[in-house]
Amino acid sequence: MSAAPGKIRRRAVVALAAGTLLLSACSGRADDSSDSGSGSGGGSDEPIVVGMSFPLSGPLSGAAAVADGAAAYFERINAEGGVDGREIEYEVLDDAYDPARQADNARQLVAQDGAGVVITFGGLAAATAPYLNGEEVAQIVPATQSVFSDTEATPFTRGWFPDSAWEGQVIGEHIGEEQPGATVGVLGLNNDLTTSLVDGLTAGGATPAKVLTVAPGVVDLTSQLNELRGAGVDTVFLSVVGPAQPATLRTMAAIGYQPTTYLYSAGADLATSVGPAGPENVTDALTAQYFKDPADPRWAEDAGVQAFREDIEKYGDAKNADSYLAIEGYGMAAAIVSVLEESGGEGGQAFIDAWDDIDGVDNPAILPGMQLSGGPGGRVLHQYQMMQFDGTSWQDVGDVVDAADRAQG
């Protein structure tokens, strides 16, 4: 993953083989899996083991940039002396977006590698939650689905990103203010991400007249767009993400379908969505946002984005310097480090307690005027900024909204 020969991450071994990305500190346990490394002993100098199961291959392999961004931040911390003198040993296993493989990976990370914190990606992490909760291992999920806000059912699971039902509600309220009487349609993935977004739109007073879903990896959505247009939909919330997002925006332009378009926050970045779609095909689109897009010229001089760029080039893969997924992983790792500093390096209950106690913590990945703080459903991110694309950059079109009071159920 290095940008050039010889740029191996400092104090890390990097290998990509048989679909597995392994990042582990050279001074770590090597083949010795007898030490937990989860921070169970006060004053320990053992590495703090953080594991991740992620789609490094398969239909959502683009999300692997999250792992690279997180690794870059962890390695920066290791280079600065670690957390209270303890290195972070960070290991990533490929699950190819397969729930069975993710579950197997989680067992390996906990039982063999001694991880006290395990990061699992996306909606399928709900199937892995029972095992990790049964083992009382802290599970962090970079996902917005509402299922990860149910801290009673899964007390050791916490979502990184706001609850997507809140995003849907913020957008629903914006539609009501700006386009009362709009006929709303949703085109999204066939999982609980779309369910959460639709629940939020409905709570915000913009009940969709039409909801269409597709499997991850499906790119040609011409028939779905024609169905929305045939149903009289004049306002579309698009959340198919990945390559399908820009392809759908291009198709909308090609067939002359010009509804008011809202983009899901994770599908509104310049490098993988706006750029491939053609900025002219995204101009005037709207989004409810909370992170900085490193490819957006608006943030070129931002201190957090500059630090991210320096670290991803030094410790990660320089090709991810414009990746919003990489900076989200970087921000997630920064949040995890902040929590580990408060938990004494421990995972499990101590980590969860420290996570929930976050109050007014800065983070390099999120927008100015926002901070991390414990909120409903264990979410520490719950603020949004409505933005509109002007052909070059995303611009604010409203005040920062704190959506914590929009928790669904």
Image (tube, rainbow, N blue to C red):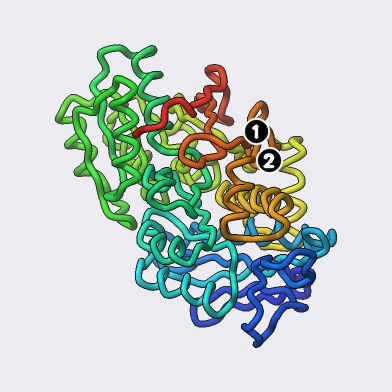
- Which residue does the image show at 24% across and 38% down from the upper left? 225
Disc 2: which residue: 363
Q: Quadrant of the N terminus?
A: bottom right
Crowding at mark 1 (Cα within 10 Å: few <14, some 14-19, many 20+): some
- Which residue does the image show at 32% across and 28% down from the upper left? 201
- SS assignment at label 2: loop
Q: For the residues marked 1 and 2, what is the alpha-carbon distance in whole angstroms?
A: 7 Å
Task: Examine the rendering and report whether any part of residue 129 can be seen.
Answer: yes
Q: In the picture shown, does residue 113 fall above or below 39?
A: below
- Which residue does the image show at 67% across and 50% down from the upper left? 339
Closest to the observer: 315 or 22? 22
Q: Quadrant of the C terminus?
A: top left
Closest to the observer: 267 or 75? 75
**Badge 1 vs badge 2, beta-carbon distance below 8 Å:** yes
Residue 330, image x and y in percent?
65, 51
In this image, 84 relative to 392: left or right? right
Residue 8, image x and y in percent?
75, 72
Q: Residue furthest front?
A: 42
Q: Quadrant of residue 255?
A: top left
Residue type, mark 2 in image: Asn
Mark nearer the N terminus (1 vs 2): 2
Disc 1: which residue: 371
In this image, 4 relative to 241: left or right? right
Residue type, mark 1 in image: Gln
- SS assignment at label 1: loop
Crowding at mark 2 (Cα within 10 Å: few <14, some 14-19, many 20+): many
Q: Residue furthest bottom?
A: 31
